Amino acid sequence: MDRASIEQLYDHLDFAWRQIVDVIGGAEEDLFTRPAPGSGWPTLRDCLGHIIFGYDRWLSIMANREPTGIAESAISLAAIDSARLACRTEVKALLERLGDSGLQEMRAFSIDDEAMPYTFGELLAHLALHERGHHGDVTTLFYQLGISEEMALEYRFHLARNLI
């Protein structure tokens, strides 16, 4: 994937993330930590924290460093939102630094103590798809918690926003 394509994916994620955070922030105070039986996740905090965990894990693999543990320390919605912003800033810096040619270069990344061949572009796309996959979990959590707020998380709604 080239830089422009990856940036489009992350722009869509930012669009969807804002909607999710706005719904949670505008709901009852305990919504973020209220148990949601049958959702697959104990709480919204656990699901959103896992998204941050994914960023921390994969960005640390790409930077060849230890994970920061930022997801474990982010327990409030504001802290989760701030942690995601920090991770997105790191993604943007990677895209700036690497450019299209660096994104396409095959490298051996150490994943679970095994050298595996990927490009930065592939791993950044994987990371974007990881977050996007959990957006479905968030909508299930909203349903289980009785939140009927309409959200337009699909990519086509993000595209339409840019046309208006």
Image (cartoon, rainbow, N blue to C red):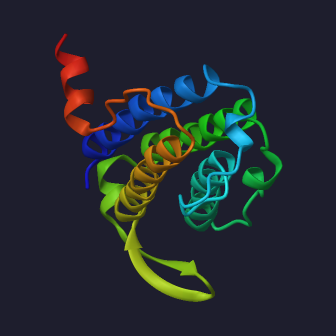
Asked if 85 appears above or below 161 in the picture, the reply is below
How many numbered marks have been drawn onto this rendered protein structure?
0
Which quarter of the picture shows residue 96? top left
Q: Is residue 34 above or below residue 160?
A: below
**Residue under the image location 23 percent in, 28 percent down:** 157
Going by the image, does 147 lie left or right of 48? Answer: left
Quarter of the rendering containing residue 160: top left
Residue at (40, 39) in percent of width and height: 13
> In the picture provided, is 33 more to the left or to the right than 105?
right
Image quarter in which the N terminus is found: bottom left
Which residue, as the protein is rendered here, is positioned at the far right?
Answer: 73
| Foreground of the two, 78 or 110 | 78
Q: Residue at x 59, y 29 (%)?
A: 24
Residue 25 in the image: state x and y as whole percent: 63, 24
List x then y, in percent, for residue 109: 51, 76
Image check: 151 left or right of 82?
left
The percent coordinates of residue 130 (x first, y second) are 44, 59
Nearest the camera: 66 or 143? 143
Q: Nearer the viewer, residue 102 or 123?
A: 123
Q: Is residue 120 left or right of residue 47?
A: left
Give the quarter of the figure containing the C terminus: top left
- Which residue is rendered at x = 61% and y = 84% of the image? 112
Q: Residue furthest bottom?
A: 114
Please state the horizontal and vertical placement of residue 23, each as a whole percent of the image: 53, 26
